[in-house]
Each structure stands twice: as C-alpha cells, then as structure tokens.
C-alpha cells in the first residue's frame, strides 16, 4: 500500500479506514481487533474517528480494541477530531461548536483517555465554527503539539477563507482539510477549496467517497443516473463501480486520500483496487458531469 507524505513527520496510507459507523456494527472487541488487524495486513494503517461519533462511544470501542491487542496502536496512524459538542437542554439535545482554548485542550485529553493512547498522529477541528477565533484555536493546537499529545493538526469541512485564516494563525502548519467529495458532492470544487489545496500541496482526506452507500441503494433518480454512468465505466475496465469511484477521486492532482466507511473487507479491497485503475482523462469528466450538477463551460 502506497503511503502519502503529508508532512515531514507524518505519512498516511493512501486509503484510510473510517470508524464513524462503528457503534452500528455491534461488534465485540475481538471482532474489532480482527478487523483492525485485517486492515493493517492490507496496508491500511490510518484509522479515522472523532469524539462526537456515537457521542464518544466510537472512540471508547476503539480504545478497548487497542487495549485488547496492544500491538495495533504501534502499527497505525490514529486520527481524531474535536469541536462538536452536545448539550442537554430542556430534555432535548442541542449540538453546537466550541473551538476555544480550554475546550480543545480538555477534549483532546479526554479522547486520549478513551482511546487508550498517549498521543494522536493527527488531530482535526471537525467543522467550521462560525465563532472561531483562529489565534486562540491555533494556540491550543500548537500547545498540544508541544506537549506531544498530537503529532500534527488539521481541519475538516473548512472553506478556503476559514482554512486560510486558521493556517495563517498556525504558521502554515495545517497538514490537511478533511472534506466530503463524491460523484454527487462538489461543494469544495465550487468553493475553490480543491484548487487552494492543489496549489498549496496540502492533501485532503475525503469522507463519504461512496456518498455513504447512497450511490448503491438510493432510489433517488439522480443517484440512479450517476450509477448508470459509473457502471458503464466499470464494465469498460472490467471492475466494480466502487473501485471506479475511488480511482476517480485518486486521479485528481490534489492527491486526495479517500476514507472508506464500510465494515466489509471485500469492500475495502475494492477501494484498494481503485489505486491501480488508470482512468482515461475523458472518463474523469464523464463522472464529474454525470449528476448534471457540474456543467463544463
Ligand atoms: N469529517 C467529517 O465531517 C466526516 C463526516 C462523515 C464521515 N467522516 C469519516 O469518513 C468515513 C467514511 O464515511 P462514510 O462511512 O460515509 O463512507 P462511504 O464509504 O461513502 O459509505 C460507507 C457506507 O456505504 C455502504 N456501502 C459501501 N459499499 C456499498 C455497496 N457496494 N452497496 C451498498 N452499500 C455500500 C457501507 O455499508 P457496509 O458497511 O455494509 O459495507 C457504509 O454504510 C467515516 O467513517 C468517518 O471516519 C468524516
């Protein structure tokens, strides 16, 4: 498996395994250990999670697996995220963002405890906080780096303006922006974020590359139309549609790292297969325009 250098200190596997849906999988710790080891055997050594996933349960389940097989943590790059919180108000849950210094510092230490680890390889600010003070948030991330609690820092779902603000405050030390991108999601093309990252040589990590599975099971007409085109290209290459989508994301000069969210190894293998598929240049545009959302001028 190819490793992608995202900073002087850190390389990530070209395909990342995501654990957002882990709590739904209802696995025992042993089953999770087996899955993690199978990922590592395939060279998928970068694991992505977040404090907010299943209200901290995903981090705890991963921490349990790291305790059960202590060799795993040493063989992976662990990514987690902070900045989204839930508060009980009037018997309801209210979700909000907090990227203030104390909150980030405390949140990181709590994540480390749940994950049974001393450090994170990469720590991300999960979402754009409209109340963000880049200087304050950057101070928290820099202090966490100095204390050895995180090796590198990045953000997720940031537009070019917020990314630039944070990166200036971080003395240009941000190593990624984790973004949604799939054949039905072009937000970050349209905002200019993908261009920004390409010119600055910063590798984005890509979430929901398969539109969270909707590419395969949505009855929505637009999904069926896009899938028809992807299937046609897959037939040309004698492969599966999922592998084509991964190949399409990897083709772009920005150097993206897709995050697979499936709990099935055979589907992870399709992501890996995507690394070896050479799309024709025109095929990239066939997928880019398939949904009708992107029009070439
Ligand atoms: N930064 C952020 O804001 C953010 C947001 C969301 C996610 N993420 C990260 O990105 C990771 C990936 O996101 P994702 O889970 O949405 O990715 P995804 O790979 O697009 O979607 C995974 C889902 O698609 C299903 N699927 C895959 N192949 C399928 C097929 N051939 N037929 C039917 N269903 C299929 C999977 O089901 P099976 O498990 O049954 O295969 C799973 O439910 C997450 O785990 C998380 O780490 C980050």
Image (spheres, grey):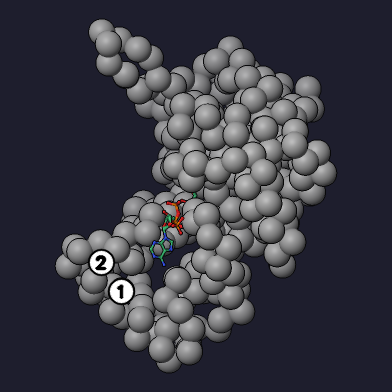
**x, y percentage for residue 104?**
58, 20
Q: Residue at x 52, y 66 (%)?
A: 267
Q: Is mark 1 on a helix, strand or loop?
A: helix
Q: How far apart are marks 1 and 2 (CA)?
A: 6 Å
Give the quarter of the image for residue 70. top right
Label number found at residue 227: 1
Q: In this view, does 285 lie above or below 213?
A: below
- Horizontal relation, residue 105 to residue 239: left or right: right
Q: How crowded is mark 1: few (under 14 residues within 10 Å), some or many (20 or more)?
A: many
Q: Is residue 196 above or below residue 297?
A: above
From the viewer's side, name the closer residue of 294 and 51. 51
Q: Residue at x 50, y 41 (%)?
A: 26
Q: Is residue 72 above or below residue 233?
A: above
- Horizontal relation, residue 139 to residue 166: left or right: right
**x, y percentage for residue 271?**
55, 68
Give the quarter of the image for residue 227. bottom left
Q: Which residue is drawn at 43% across and 91% down?
A: 236
Q: Mark 2 points at which residue?
A: 223
- Horizontal relation, residue 290 to residue 71: left or right: left
From the viewer's side, name the closer residue of 171 and 12. 12
Give the quarter of the image for residue 295. bottom left
Check the image and name the residue furthest to the top: 90
**x, y percentage for residue 173?**
67, 39
Question: From this viewpoint, is residue 200 visible?
Answer: no
Q: Is mark 2 on a helix, strand or loop?
A: helix
- Quadrant of ligand 1: it is bottom left
For the C terminus, give its image quadrant. Answer: bottom left
Residues at badges 1 and 2 in contact (C-beta under 8 Å)? yes
Question: From this viewpoint, is residue 40 visible?
Answer: yes
For the N terminus, give its image quadrant. Answer: bottom right
């Amino acid at each position: 498996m190819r490793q992608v250098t995202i900073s002087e200190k850190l390389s990530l596997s070209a395909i990342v395994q995501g654990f957002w849906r882990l709590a739904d999988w209802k696995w025992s710790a042993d089953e999770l250990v087996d899955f993690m080891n199978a990922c590592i055997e395939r060279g998928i050594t970068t694991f992505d999670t977040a404090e907010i996933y299943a209200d901290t349960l995903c981090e705890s389940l991963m921490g349990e697996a790291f305790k059960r097989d202590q060799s795993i943590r040493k063989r992976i790059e662990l990514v987690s995220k902070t900045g989204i919180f839930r508060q009980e108000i009037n018997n309801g849950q209210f979700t909000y963002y907090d990227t203030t210094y104390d909150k980030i510092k405390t949140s990181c230490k709590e994540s480390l405890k749940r994950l049974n680890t001393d450090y994170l390889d990469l720590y991300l600010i999960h979402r754009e906080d409209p109340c963000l003070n880049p200087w304050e948030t950057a101070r928290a991330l820099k202090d966490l780096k100095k204390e050895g609690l995180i090796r590198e820092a990045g953000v997720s779902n940031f537009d070019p303006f917020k990314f630039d603000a944070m990166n200036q405050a971080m003395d240009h030390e941000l190593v990624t922006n984790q973004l949604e991108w799939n054949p039905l999601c072009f937000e970050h093309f349209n905002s200019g974020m993908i261009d920004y990252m390409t010119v600055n040589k910063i590798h984005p990590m890509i979430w929901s590359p398969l539109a969270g599975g909707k590419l395969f099971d949505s009855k929505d007409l637009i999904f069926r139309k896009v899938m028809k085109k992807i299937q046609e290209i897959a037939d040309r290459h004698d492969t599966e549609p999922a592998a084509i989508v991964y190949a399409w994301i990897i083709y772009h000069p920005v150097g993206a790292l897709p995050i697979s969210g499936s709990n099935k190894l055979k589907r992870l293998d399709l992501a890996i297969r995507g690394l070896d598929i050479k799309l024709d240049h025109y095929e990239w545009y066939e997928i880019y325009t398939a949904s009708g959302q992107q029009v070439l001028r």
